[in-house]
Image (cartoon, rainbow, N blue to C red):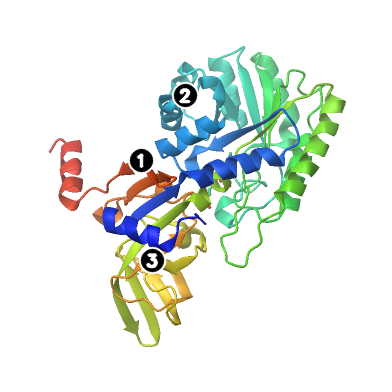
């Protein structure tokens, strides 16, 4: 959770209104440095998975800290380059690429991380003699929800380990030089043992006879943060030590000290973000107490999409008697909620609620569904506003839609 005090957050809502996404830049730096310190291996590099939050100020903070970028679309690459990342600092983890997309990204001189044989074949035909990274499916099923488990045969991701020989043949045919091997087990994995198994499975194919030209191995993201009040923080120090030991053992057999990459998204930015909303309507439906707010799943879809838990604090009445609430949004859909049967200090209309740990996959997954604008966003460091993007007022939103349609 961000270190901002309740009174500071309340003062921000007075100045900038609600709904409001506030990010604590210092916490992003802290998480980045913390993560770097876990890995006792000098050739470790962090590639920030910018899908978690593409806010350009956050990207700039991470450049300053020394991060690289894991991008998943041509526009993500363009934005990363625009804010200052160099092409060699970006890895493109492609997903169902069309040939047009391959050309578009290749022009930008970015390394491709390819996770299917068909894409590899097309890439090799279009750009023989290129360097490439291969994404393998680690054959482990893990993640905080079915929708974010990327390993195992039931998902669309990665080349199956059993297809190793076919992969080598395609690369040989097109003279592709395999310089990286990648795996990503899933997102928000609380059990480090499962994540470790994905790593072990991937390391099993890292041999000079399979890939003689390797420079790095990338173990993706998936680091979980404690969303629940009573959830312990995973012991990533011990985990990292275990990975490095295993990795170094593999490097010894391979005969070279390879670089070790990770692609965290959530861990770096989730806790920095708070979505501040205003209770607009308190409603007692039979025995159910409903607190309706001026935001909805178009601003934070995680509770609806993954049943995700985000702490909710009534900043205006923190010591009020706790009551059970369904905290719901203003979108015209039954599923639109932030919390169900949640104990929160008594909420009254006009109270400000903080929805915590929303810096990852919050704004980035947002939309203007129901024609409700995206919230105002601000990034703050040591009390200074680094970035302020006001929400579009309804007339401005309409103006934009009409002008986009050349109406
Ligand atoms: N690398 C790859 C190849 C990925 O697919 C992802 C996430 C990451 C890195 C970063 O994973 P992280 O460290 O953030 O767990 N919207 C979902 C999460 C989707 C993650 C998709 N891929 C959520 O809100 O939980």
Disc 3/disc 2 C-alpha distance (Å): 46 Å
Q: Residues within 10 Å of mark 2 (few under 14, many from 20)?
A: few
- On the image, the x and y values in percent for residue 162 come to 75, 36
Q: Residue at x 77, y 18 (%)?
A: 212
Disc 1/disc 2 C-alpha distance (Å): 37 Å
Q: For the C terminus, give its image quadrant.
A: top left
- On the image, the x and y values in percent for residue 392 come to 23, 47
Q: Which mark is residue 403?
A: none
Disc 1/disc 3 C-alpha distance (Å): 22 Å
- On the image, the x and y values in percent for residue 385 come to 36, 43
Q: Looking at the picture, tell me which residue is in the foreground, 44 or 381.
A: 381
Q: Residue at x 46, y 28 (%)?
A: 98
**Is the CB of mark 2 within 8 Å of ligand 1?**
no
Q: Residues within 10 Å of mark 3 (few under 14, many from 20)?
A: many
Q: Looking at the picture, tell me which residue is in the foreground, 299 or 314.
A: 314
The quadrant in which residue 136 appears is top right
Q: Residue at x 70, y 16 (%)?
A: 172
Q: Looking at the picture, tell me which residue is in the foreground, 154 or 135.
A: 135
Task: Read off the residue under disc 2.
Answer: 99
Mark 2 falls on what kind of element? helix
Number of numbered discs: 3
Q: In this picture, is 289 found above or below 133?
A: below
Q: Which mark is residue 353?
A: 3
Q: Which label lies toward us, 1 or 2? A: 1
- On the image, the x and y values in percent for residue 406 come to 15, 35
Q: Residues within 10 Å of mark 1 (few under 14, many from 20)?
A: some
Task: Read off the residue under disc 1.
Answer: 387
Q: In this picture, is 160 found above or below 149?
A: above
Q: Is residue 171 left or right of residue 165?
A: left
């Amino acid at each position: 959770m961000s270190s901002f005090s309740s009174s500071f957050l309340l003062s921000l809502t007075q100045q900038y209104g609600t709904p409001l996404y506030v990010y604590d830049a210092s916490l992003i730096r802290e998480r980045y440095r913390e993560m770097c310190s876990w890995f006792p291996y000098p050739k470790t590099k962090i590639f920030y998975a910018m899908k978690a939050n593409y806010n350009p100020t956050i990207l700039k903070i991470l450049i300053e800290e020394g991060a690289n970028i894991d991008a998943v679309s041509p526009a993500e690459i363009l934005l990363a380059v625009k804010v200052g990342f160099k092409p060699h600092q970006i890895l493109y983890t492609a997903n169902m690429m069309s040939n047009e997309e391959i050309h578009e990204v290749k022009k930008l001189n970015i390394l491709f991380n390819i996770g299917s044989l068909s894409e590899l074949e097309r890439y090799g035909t279009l750009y023989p003699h290129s360097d490439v990274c291969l994404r393998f499916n680690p054959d482990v099923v893990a993640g905080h929800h079915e929708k974010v488990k990327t390993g195992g045969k039931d998902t669309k991701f990665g080349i199956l380990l059993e297809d190793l020989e076919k992969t080598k043949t395609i690369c040989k045919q097109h003279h592709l030089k395999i310089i990286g091997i990648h795996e990503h087990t899933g997102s928000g994995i609380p059990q480090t043992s499962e994540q470790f198994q994905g790593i072990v499975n991937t390391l099993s194919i890292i041999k000079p006879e399979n890939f003689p030209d390797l420079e790095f191995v990338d173990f993706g993201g998936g680091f979980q943060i404690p969303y629940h009040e009573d959830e312990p923080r995973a012991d990533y120090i011990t985990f990292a030590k275990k990975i490095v030991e295993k990795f170094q053992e593999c490097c010894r057999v391979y005969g070279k000290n390879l670089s070790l990459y990770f692609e965290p998204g959530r861990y770096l930015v989730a806790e920095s973000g708070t979505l501040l909303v205003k209770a607009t309507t308190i409603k007692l439906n039979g025995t159910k107490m409903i607190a309706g707010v001026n935001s909805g799943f178009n601003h934070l879809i995680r509770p609806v999409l993954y049943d995700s838990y985000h702490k909710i604090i009534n900043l205006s009445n923190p010591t009020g008697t706790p009551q059970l609430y369904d905290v719901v949004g203003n979108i015209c859909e039954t599923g639109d909620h932030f919390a169900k049967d949640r104990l929160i200090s008594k909420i009254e209309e006009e109270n400000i609620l903080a929805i915590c740990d929303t810096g990852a996959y919050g704004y980035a997954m947002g939309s203007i569904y129901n024609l409700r604008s995206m919230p105002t966003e601000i990034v703050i460091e040591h009390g200074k506003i680094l970035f302020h993007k006001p929400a579009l007022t309804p007339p401005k939103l309409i103006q934009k839609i009409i002008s986009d349609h050349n109406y």
